[in-house]
Amino acid sequence: MPLPQPDDLTSLVLRTDFGDEGAWDAVRAALGAAGGHPHATYVSELRFAGVGVQALMAEEAAADEDDQIIYMFLADAATMKEPGHPLLAVDLSDEPGRTFRVPARSFPDISANLSIANMDFAEFADAVDGSRTFRGFDKT
């Protein structure tokens, strides 16, 4: 079954941790508060509970070309527990499996630039800090 498709000009935020409904609400609130208009298509389906990057890459590779997406953001256990709710950005196309963390406050800029193909995944991934977190281009 292909991964869900994001709405136009948004990025897919896929929930993989289902241990705390309040934390999921907090993640969505943080992402919503970070931007002036919607940047995310939220998917909260139990079939993705605990799924890892490799399994998602395999599922996406098996999808028809028209149904494939090129990147996504995971709301995993770290996203739910850590301050700033850092999502895990996952490249599914150019360098499949390449990842980095994105604090909620940085998500709208990354989502907007990726969704309109203004920038590539690698441009953000190449600008991460020592913890593999994107904090902006001037903070690496």
Image: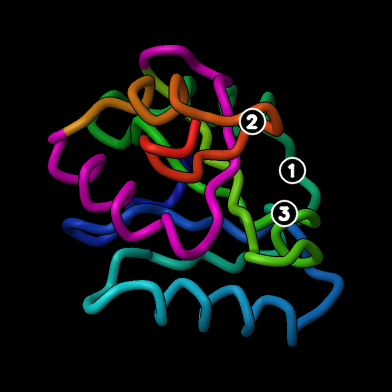
CA separation in Å, label 2 and label 3:
16 Å
Q: Residue at x 50, y 17 (%)?
A: 96
Q: Residue at x 82, y 78 (%)?
A: 20
Is residue 137 shown above or below 85?
above
Q: Earlier in the sequence, mark 2 or mark 3?
A: 3
Q: Residue at x 62, y 84 (%)?
A: 25
Query: CB atoms at circles 2 and 3 under 8 Å apart?
Result: no
Q: Nearer the viewer, mark 3 or mark 1?
A: 3
Q: Residue 95's x, y, as percent?
A: 45, 12
> Can you identify the residue that label 2 sits on?
132
Label 3 element class: loop
Is residue 71 shown above or below 30?
above
Specify whether 1 is left or right of 9.
right
Q: Residue at x 51, y 48 (%)?
A: 73
Q: Along the line of sight, which residue is nearer the eye, 138 or 128?
A: 138
Q: Nearer the viewer, mark 2 or mark 3?
A: 2
Q: Residue 94's x, y, as percent?
A: 37, 14
> Can you identify the residue that label 3 sits on?
76
CA separation in Å, label 2 and label 1:
20 Å
Q: Residue 26's x, y, as percent?
A: 63, 82
Is residue 31 shown above or below 87?
below
Q: What's under tag 3, amino acid-wise?
A: Asp
**What range of the chain is rendered magenta?**
94-118
Q: Earlier in the sequence, mark 2 or mark 1?
A: 1
Label 1 element class: loop
Q: Nearer the viewer, mark 2 or mark 1?
A: 2
Q: Earlier in the sequence, mark 3 or mark 1?
A: 1
> Can you identify the residue that label 1 sits on?
51
Tag 1: Cα neighbours inside 10 Å, few (<14), some, or many (≥20)? some
